Amino acid sequence: MGSTLYQKIVDAHLVDSLGEDLVLYIDRHLIHEVTTPQAFAGLNEKNRKVRRPDLTFGTMDHSISTRSLAIDACGPQNALQLKTLAANCAQHGIELYPMGHKNQGIVHVIGPQLGLIQPGMTVVCGDSHTATHGAFGALAFGIGTSQVEHVLATQTLKQSRAKSMLVKVDGKLGLGVTAKDIILAIIGKIGHAGATGHVIEYAGSAIRDLSMEQRMTICNMSIEAGAKAGLIAPDEKTFAYIEGKEHAPKGEKWQQALAYWKTLYSDDDAVFDTVVNLVAEDIVPQVTWGTNPGQVIGVNDSVPSPDDFDDPIVKASASKALKYMALEPGQKLTDVAISHVFIGSCTNSRIEDLRAAAAIAKHGKVKPSVTAIVVPGSVAVKAQAEQEELDKIFIEAGFEWRLPGCSMCLGMNDDVLQEGDRCASTSNRNFEGRQGRGARTHLVSPEMAAAAAISGTFADVRRFGA
Amino acid sequence: MAAINILTGRAAPLDQANIDTDQIIPKQFLTGVTRTGYGKHLFHDWRYLDTNESVLNPDFSLNHEQYQGANILLTRENFGCGSSREHAPWALADYGFKAIIAVSYADIFYGNCINNQLLPVALSSEQVDQIFAILQQDSNTEIMIDLPAQTVTVSGRVFPFEIAAHHKENLLKGLDAIGQTLELERKIADFEATRQIWL
């Protein structure tokens, strides 16, 4: 029996196994201000060192302002956290990209952008969207703060073997249908906890056809189906994306790396615990209607009724979600007015996302009743967008053009919605209160978010010839 | 950390599936730099009617008088889904919970509980239904969780539960996971010597 890609990466990182616990070596540890202060404090208490500061990279992203580079722009608590990160990185010799640095940005945007993420690596970060990096055929997963401390001290992590799930998407995507719609459709099909305990490998012709940035969008939301990680086997697109980047192998090392990377795929006779198939042609632009990412429908479908579900738990969840979201069964989302649009987050803030949103924004003006913000994923993405004059398109259409950061995806800064606000958001979570207490979040693609901004309601982006 | 062995107490019911870590502890409380003080913000949006945490929501079960002092949380499927924030188990533990009984847990949250000596017990949907029903009859019902025996005893009914051997050992001994791994220094160093040259 052959091996899955997941098994190959695990086997190549096995330091030891203690019973069911595998001790895995970690190639890249990305850190940010929110989930690390307690980890460093734990190290310092016990007088422990960071084993491999050279494999650890820090950025400021979660609790920063998108209007000002000042570290205290969002109050003293946020500032303390940011200063603590800077002090910890300085003390332990860790490279940090602070406010104003050319490499600063959302942790899952800058990692790939700098060539830090390469096929076959193990990558961890105290953030559940670390699975983003699986787009490179790296085993990447989110960890808690105690585990951050463990990795800092030992450069290893204890893990149990995960089950494996193959999600195959074959066929050609229709016009206006994006990677975001694929992943939302997958989560809608398998459910919000459908992949718990599993590592998902995404495959099939529709996945192969995606660009690297689109693949990152897919892997990013693996956690929203409960998966530990999401993976896509590397191919020529992967290698071309990495080549020449700051941290990419060079010269002879590049050749050796490439030869190894080409061995990173699931063997034909590898066995997966679960297999899920989707047909690309069946996927339409998606909009979530509920309070978890699995509560999703096609843009032209009607909001479901709790009675549509047999399982009493699912029924109760739907009922509670409809109440929170102030939606009625049978309602069309294209009739539902929005108050806000957020284009950004580690899911959808890369240059291709901004290009796609700008192409729709050109078709009109943001409705006066809507506040729309665009938050690029990194300083580099922002600079690239400005070079292409995408900022001008957005500003001309009535969008606000902000500084990079996590922003309204979770609202740890001042980009917070108010009770009753309704937001078309390109982020990854529509949980109750995620973007603000009592605020209602609908997850969509960047194109759909732009279409909603200029329509004032959810709108089928295909109407704009996208 | 304090070891867990046999735990007895009362449970507070939270009858809902898919409770995410944003509900357990919302983002505005993640700006701390210590592991303590999160208990008062636990389930903030549901527990309080105002953002200043001065008005309790009388409809929220944890606010009901009969559940004050409960040290076990009873809930349903996929508890702790979403964000990896370890502030979630910190808040639950700081509030006074020593164990959770649920149908299932999200992976990262489960690991975070183990690392904080908060015992996550998984029982079947039917068993959890039974405990909800027993609590409805008598909120004072004593629940005993015997970790060495891997059983939950409620009103004379005994429900066995599964837990990975290494998780069980960590909880029973309150081990320092980092200290254990540091003892593998030789193996880690040997592994490092074999890493690919481009890494």
Image (cartoon, coloured by chain):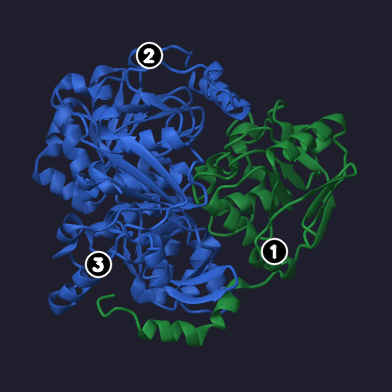
Chain colours: A blue, B green
Q: Quadrant of the N terminus of chain A?
A: bottom left
Residue A8 lies, in percent from the top left, at 37, 66
Residue marked by disc 2 = A332
Does residue A427 sit above or below B93 in this rendering? above
Q: Residue at x 36, y 47 (%)?
A: A220
Q: Quadrant of the C terminus of chain A?
A: top left
Report whether residue A435 is seen: no
Element class at badge 2 = loop
In this orientation, which residue lies closer to the viewer: B42 or B154? B154
Q: Residue at x 36, y 42 (%)?
A: A407
Find the distance from the CA under tag 2 to the CA under tag 3.
Answer: 47 Å
Find the distance from the CA under tag 1 to the CA under tag 2.
Answer: 50 Å
Circle 2 or circle 3, nearest the eye: 3
Using residue B190 as the reference point, say whether residue B136 is left or right of it: right
**Label 1 environment density (alpha carbons within 10 Å; few <14, some 14–19, many ≥20):** some
Tell me the kind of residue under disc 3: Trp
Tell me the kind of residue under disc 1: Lys
Chain bearing tag 1 is: B
Q: Can marks 1 and 2 be said to lie on one chain? A: no
Chain bearing tag 3 is: A
Q: Can marks 2 and 3 be said to lie on one chain? A: yes
Residue marked by disc 1 = B168
Element class at badge 3 = helix
Does residue A358 sit above or below A153 in this rendering? above
Residue marked by disc 3 = A261
Tell me the kind of residue under disc 2: Lys
Chain bearing tag 2 is: A
Circle 1 or circle 3, nearest the eye: 3
Using residue B177 as the reference point, say whether residue A72 is left or right of it: left
Q: Are marks 2 and 3 in contact (CB under 8 Å)?
A: no
